[in-house]
Amino acid sequence: MTSGQWSPATIVAVSLLCFSTLFTVYRTRSQRGNSSQRIPEVGEFLPLLTAWSFFAKRRDFLWENFKKTGAQIFRFRVLRHHVVAMKGLEARKMFFNEKALDLFEGVKIFSYTGPNMRDIDVAAAEQSNQFLMKQFANLVSKERLVDVLPAMLKDTDALMAQWGAEGTLDPFKELNDVVFQLIVRMGSCRELAEDRDVVSRMSVCLDNLEKNGTPIAHLLPWFPSPARRAIVRNNRALFELVKPFVEARRAATERTTDTIDLLLQAGFPLDNVVELVLGVINAGYVNTGMNVGWTAIFTGMHPEWKDKLAAEFQALLANHTENSSLPIHERLASIPLNVWEAELPVMDVVMRETLRMTMGILSLRRNLGADVSVGDKTIQTGEFLAYPMEDVHYDPEIYSDPHAFDPRRFDEGREEDKRAPLAFLAWGGGRHVCLGMRLAKLEVKLVLAMFFLTFEFQVVDAAGRVPKSLPRVDFNDLQRPRPQKGNPCYIKFKRLAKDN
């Protein structure tokens, strides 16, 4: 929307916002003084423009200002909020180890956080973050993973069967859809996961939330812009899609180990169970499906690793299953969880390298405790912190030729990820480790095992030719690690044989 298309009400709202923000900036600056230890400020008197740049091209904004200030730390404003951007080892150690830095508060304002039930007047769960994290840990316990593993493989087989014998697919759509189905299976209940219409509509709603997470929607959440109205509409739709299943499980006489039942047994009110189910589903939706797509792309562009991975999955079948007449998904379902987790070394290093290359995104925190320090600089209570993981994952002092796909960099004796503290952050680090790591790893392995054992494939461009170069991740994308625009890539596939 250009300024000429804005309504008079929008122009007045933005003008008042600019005035109030400039006044706040002036007052804050006068209070801070001119200490030599002061963090460099960026865009102090143009906070709206600075905020817009941050939301529009986040990665470029950060690295341009690191260069402009010549510092490893700088402060900027997003309306009334202070954000401190930082890079380097000392910043990384503080960012991931400081107890007072809160992840949930960090992403609440500055990042796409998926469904938000406050938009439709559903009160947040009253329990602490620590209690909620404990409940999430229960949802991804070993017992639950073992219980749901066969159903996830059956889901994967059913969706891949819909692709047909051969064709071309968008790995960031079709493979992502498969992963989303597994996430719903794990994060809700059997009845919801097996209602394909509801699952499809949920996916559409989440996509719509993502698409409407515009700078205007972020910067002016109180203003009823078209994007803001779409966000509220899709949040309501998600709530209404999931609520009937929670009501049905609450009324059921038999209890299961499904997520909805576990949350009901933990004492959560119905509306909060809906909220938490959507939160669990969204947590997996954002990155896991994208990284399955990237793994297919990277291995497809590197025949050596594609062949190694295919051979490892073939050995998995040969060494751990007996009845070769069964469908592949049933044979894989008979393999113990510990084998999936500990006996796929090629898959593990391929996944690790894929995550290193794709997880260069911005990580966010908020300081909820006392002032903390990075060197001689002070981060004040209430301030937000931003650390780009690209700083370490693409550091040539740690990772040789960092833009190259090279899983061997993790081999024993080379181990580039051990050259510096906290050098691999795809699963978090320090005090802030991803609680969904075990589930996400399993989902990636299940989907790729089915894919490699069922299809022969190659990577092609929009013209159907083998790409000349490896696609790169767009770290300016606010939401997910997609390929840079103008460089699309696809998977051309052919089914190897019927698996039954």
Image: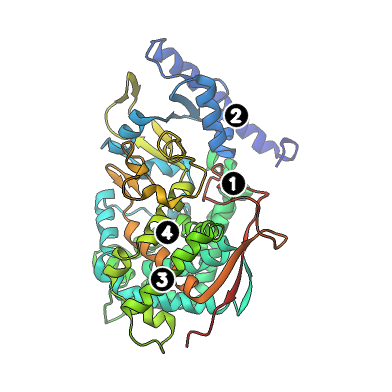
CA separation in Å, label 2 and label 4: 32 Å
- Amino acid type for the residue under numbered disc 1: Pro
Mark 1 neighbour class, 10 Å CA radius: few under 14, some 14 to 19, many 20 or more: some
- Amino acid type for the residue under numbered disc 4: Gly
CA separation in Å, label 3 and label 2: 51 Å
Residue bearing the label numbered 4: 284
Which picture quadrant has residue 73?
A: top left
**Which is nearer the N-term, disc 3 or disc 2?**
2
The image shows residue 91 at horizontal and vertical percentages of 36, 30
Task: Indicate which label's residue lies in the foreground, 4 or 1.
Answer: 4
Task: Indicate which label's residue lies in the foreground, 2 or 4.
Answer: 4
The image shows residue 305 at horizontal and vertical percentages of 48, 60
- Amino acid type for the residue under numbered disc 3: Phe
Q: Quadrant of the N terminus?
A: top right
Residue bearing the label numbered 1: 224
Marks 4/3 in contact by CB < 8 Å: the verdict is no
Q: Point out which mark residue 49 bears.
A: 2
Q: Label 2's element?
A: helix
Marks 1/3 in contact by CB < 8 Å: the verdict is no
**Which is nearer the N-term, disc 2 or disc 4?**
2
- Amino acid type for the residue under numbered disc 2: Leu
Q: Label 3's element?
A: helix
**Which is nearer the N-term, disc 2 or disc 1?**
2
CA separation in Å, label 4 and label 3: 24 Å
Task: Indicate which label's residue lies in the foreground, 4 or 3.
Answer: 3
